[in-house]
Image (spheres, grey):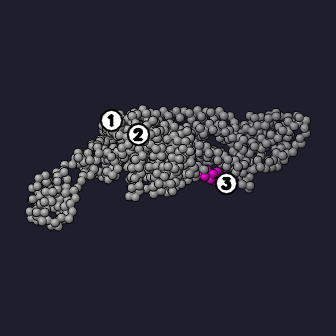
Amino acid sequence: MSIIALDHVTKRFGETIALNDFSLHVEAGELFGLLGPNGAGKTTAISVMLNLYPADSGTIRIFNHSMPKDEQTIKRRVGIVPQHVSVYDQLTVFENIQFFAELYGFKPAEAKQKTVAALDFVELTPHQKKRPPELSGGLLRRLNIACGIVHEPELIFMDEPTVAIDPQSRNTILENIRELNRRGATIIYTSHYMEEVEMLCDRVAIVDEGRIIAEGTQDELKDQVMTLETARIKVDALTPGLLGRLESLERVKKVEYEEPFLDVSLEKDTPLAPLLDVLHDEQVRFTSITVDRPSLNTVFLALTGKTLRE
Amino acid sequence: MKLWTFIKYDVKQQLRDRSTLFWMLIFPIILIFGLGTMLSAIFNSNFSLPVTDVAYVEQSTDDYRVPLETFLADDDIQSFIHLVPYDSIAAAETGVNDGDADVILHLDGPDVRLLYEEPSTIEFDVIEAILRQYTDVANQQIMLAETGVSAPFESETFIDSESIDLSGRTPTSLEYFTVTISIMTALFGAFYITGMLSEEQPMTGSYLRIQAAPVKRIEYRLARSLSRYTLIFLQLVLVFWFSHFVYRSFSLDYVHFGLLFIAWLALALYGTAFGFLVSSLPRLSRSTKDAIVNGFVAIIMILSGGYVPGFDQVTLSVAPWAQYVFMPIFMREGILQVLLRGGDPAVFWQSLGWLALHLLVFATLSLLLWKGVNRRGAI
């Protein structure tokens, strides 16, 4: 059963169409990636799912409840980690987390226990008495996460939670996200960092201009767009007939040489043995062969004609 | 319970915010202290009141005339009161109109009346205070005499240096500060509403989390309003407490807290309505709206004497209609007297009516503008 079911959702801001016939289905327990460039509609999609902006048309069902009709019921089971650190500067780390725990209906004593657990989870216990302005960017991001998960939600929206932080903090946060998912939370993870999405997510939807243009596992997405692979061979030197012989091989589309690399474009899943035989015959010595696997960025490029960082 | 959670954490935040602490708690004390010191310096011990010509109309018997005239013949009192006898009130009024006297003292049977035109001056206030002392003691004398207890008449009993000491005028700073604080209360409401609405844009700041939480918007707004007005109430308590204990001559016994509370409440609503109006203005940026509110606050504060004590009288003398247009609850003759010393509350209720009219206009305009904004689909 889908934990999230969005069907034909449209959202306009004046003349701008932020979501255009947007449909999305996410299963319970998934770590689902929403990938797209800035302004693609990822954050608007989350906002509409939480009724922060009402949708203009379409249907939204979360936990099999209808939004906005069952808004309060849904929200009790959902957590959000916003793109911008959303905490109160005048409250300590501990108080910030406890405040949000109490907002989700926990009594102060219970909220305190949850806060201790959340602090421990994001490894912020040593900083619990500090106020947000005293924290580094990475610690702030962790506080942002703690505030969003303190009530142990079943569904968590994480909107670019690793923007503008150091690699070490990023790794800690990514590990936190995996752990939350292992504990059973369904996570919707938005990012324009394809490496993170590739690393974390089971399934991915690629969003562009308010629409989902492709959806599936990473392999499924790559299969949708990739017909060629590139074998990159590091060679010592070329012989006069080598390029011609390689180009004449079956399923080889193009051969290019830029010292010291020989790039051979092949149809997908072409065996490399004939290629190596030619090299052997021509007595060309090579020191390495790598086959360039497509990335999500390649997929995005193929689908939209632009890169994710645009 | 969520209401309490919001209030608890919001008040905590406000009390930790240094700028809030300064403007809400420290600045008012500095202001009171500064104004108090300034006025004390003006009315120092070397200060002497100018002599006031008092038109005296005696229409009584010797039983009441002799004690009063004996009292007024005291050297200390003679130093600033010059009695000019008249046969009738009409003649005395003619004398006042001709400039031969400033105020009328009418001994009518057992009653002692001081008649003067508003606005009163410090001199008239002092004469009134002395006469009140006299009548209070005289009444006690009569009561003691009626119950058969002898009570010797001692004229010096009436000269209470503490009550006549002109530093006792220092609470004027409090009176003016009451105007200031009340206007601040009202306009803080305006700030609050414009601030709250701009803060309540989806996907911005901590409000995003509040929106994403299972919290009703009305609950959140109510809690925030309550917490902010709790702080203002704390500020008012502090101001009164400080003024009362530092400038002891000001008696809280005379303050009509019921009326004052209604005035604050009305002004808070006024500010809130104004805030709604400004926030409903289309095609204006947040900073422009803030500038409008700030400018409005500054104008009202100046015109009503909030910054410069007494400026309200200047405003009213130049533009009498201002009492109906700008903050009618305070820019009305005699309002302060009613709130701080008692008197006929008719002017208070009349002003409240005008304020209600303003509220109605603000609310109607806000509603119309708001509907217009929604129709155009702007966010």
Q: Which residue is mark 2?
A: A50
In the rendered image, residue A204 lying in the magenta stretch gets the answer no
| Residue A151 visible in this rendered orientation of the protein | yes
Q: How many marks?
A: 3
Q: Is residue B328 left or right of residue A189?
A: right
Q: Position of residue A128 (x, y in %)?
A: 52, 54
Are the residues tagged 3 and 2 within 8 Å (C-beta)?
no
Q: Which residue is mark 3?
A: B37
Chain for disc number 2: A
Q: Which mark is residue A7?
A: 1
Question: Between tags 3 and 2, which lies in front?
Answer: 2
Judging depth in this view, the residue of B243 and A246 nearest the camera is A246
Q: Is residue A222 left or right of residue B24?
A: left
Packing grade of label 2 (10 A; few <14, some 14-19, many >=20) is many
Q: Position of residue B340 (x, y in %)?
A: 68, 41
Of the 4 image quadrants, the one containing the C terminus of chain B is top left
Mark positioned earlier in the residue sequence (2 or 1): 1
What span is in magenta?
B26-40
Q: CA distance from mark 1 to mark 3?
A: 71 Å
Q: CA distance from mark 2 to mark 1?
A: 15 Å
